[in-house]
Amino acid sequence: SFACFGGAPRKPILVIAPAGLKGLSKKFAVNILPCLPPDLIPAARLRPTRNNVRVVGISDIAEQPPTPSYNAALAEDSGMARHAALLHAAFSACPPLTEAAVLLKVWLRQRGLAGAPDGAGGFFLS
């Protein structure tokens, strides 16, 4: 199935859950997050004052309003692969760090803070 990453409709994710395994399909799921290559969009185009979504009816590019939220989302997507590689290296070098991250994620879920639209997710906190 499909879902929205962090509740953002412009960030689709693929959710894979086991089917046909008695009781396991509701216990866990694997989220696949598509991400942009880091060098696909130049950093200068992702500044908060730039526009990356054209408004219909405004033909002059200089009059287009800035899109800081969309630009930040693109920047986050383009840094995700680097971030994952950094986390993998850090967790490989320090095994107790993995346990600490799991504990932090459990703590977030118990308090209802994980997955909130304005809350911090596990990937961000790791």
Image (cartoon, rainbow, N blue to C red):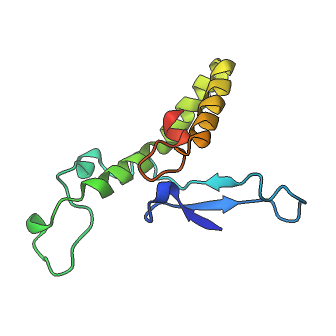
> Residue 61 location, x and y as percent?
13, 68
Say which of 73 and 25 sits in front.
Answer: 25
Q: In this rendering, would 62 be left or right of 30? A: left
> Residue 78 location, x and y as percent?
42, 48
Quadrant of the image containing the C terminus: top right
- Numbered marks: total: 0
Say which of 104 and 86 sits in front.
Answer: 104
Quarter of the image for residue 59 reads bottom left
Say which of 58 and 121 sits in front.
Answer: 121
Q: In this rendering, would 108 be left or right of 67? A: right
Q: Name which residue lies at 50% across and 52% down.
A: 35
Q: In this rendering, would 79 be left or right of 26? A: left
- Against 23, residue 80 (above or below) is above
Residue reaching furthest to the right:
22
Q: Name which residue lies at 40% across and 46% down.
A: 76
Residue reaching furthest to the bottom:
57
Q: Name which residue lies at 60% across and 36% down.
A: 105
Quadrant of the image containing the N terminus: bottom right
> Residue 122 location, x and y as percent?
55, 40
Q: In this rendering, would 64 be left or right of 24? A: left
- Against 101, residue 19 (above or below) is below
> Residue 97 location, x and y as percent?
62, 22
